[in-house]
Amino acid sequence: MTQTTGSEFFGAVLTAIACTRNNGPDGDAYDQGVVEPARRIRALEEETTGRGLTTDETERVLGWLETILDTKRVPDAEREYHRDRVSRAGGLTVVMRGTA
């Protein structure tokens, strides 16, 4: 993976977070699984302003996004849509997690 372009990538990630409905019933889980990872994503966005993201940073953001989507219990089809937008915005080839 090469360096990810920051502004478009972060824009797509934050859009995915904002546009997905929370289907999870637990408020405490929401704080831990949505609010905290979103805060970390925004902090990393500020930290990396003006440069591309490293592979490690990109993977961390994608992991936090997955945590958020898991916590919100976002349906698979919607997840795929957002993953595609994020990967195109960042110039990524994303390998999906799951069983082989």
Image (tube, rainbow, N blue to C red):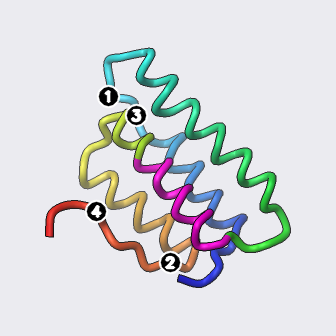
Determine which of the numbered discs, if any, sits on residue 92 in the image: 2
Q: Where residue 40 sits: x, y (%)?
A: 65, 42
Q: Is residue 10 above or below residue 32?
A: below
Magenta stretch: residue 82 in it?
Answer: no
Residue annotated with mark 4: 97
Q: Residue at x 30, y 36 (%)?
A: 73
* 62 in the magenta segment: yes
Give yes or no for contact between labels 1 and 4 (Cβ–Cβ under 8 Å).
no
Earlier along the polypeptide chain: callout 3 or callout 2? 3
Q: Amino acid at mark 1?
A: Asn
Secondary structure beneath label 2: loop
SS for callout 1: loop
Check disc 3 and report the residue beneath it. 21
In this rendering, the label closer to the viewer, 3 or 2: 2
Task: Determine whether, in the image, residue 58 is placed left or right of residue 72.
Answer: right
Quarter assignment of residue 6: bottom right
Query: Hey, what amino acid is under mark 3?
Result: Arg
Q: Secondary structure at mark 3?
A: loop
Instruction: Tell me: 73 left or right of 69.
Output: left
Marks 1 and 3 in Cβ contact (< 8 Å): yes
Residue to which mark 1 is pinned: 23
- The residue lying at 47 percent from left, 66 percent from top is 85
Magenta part of the chain = 54-66
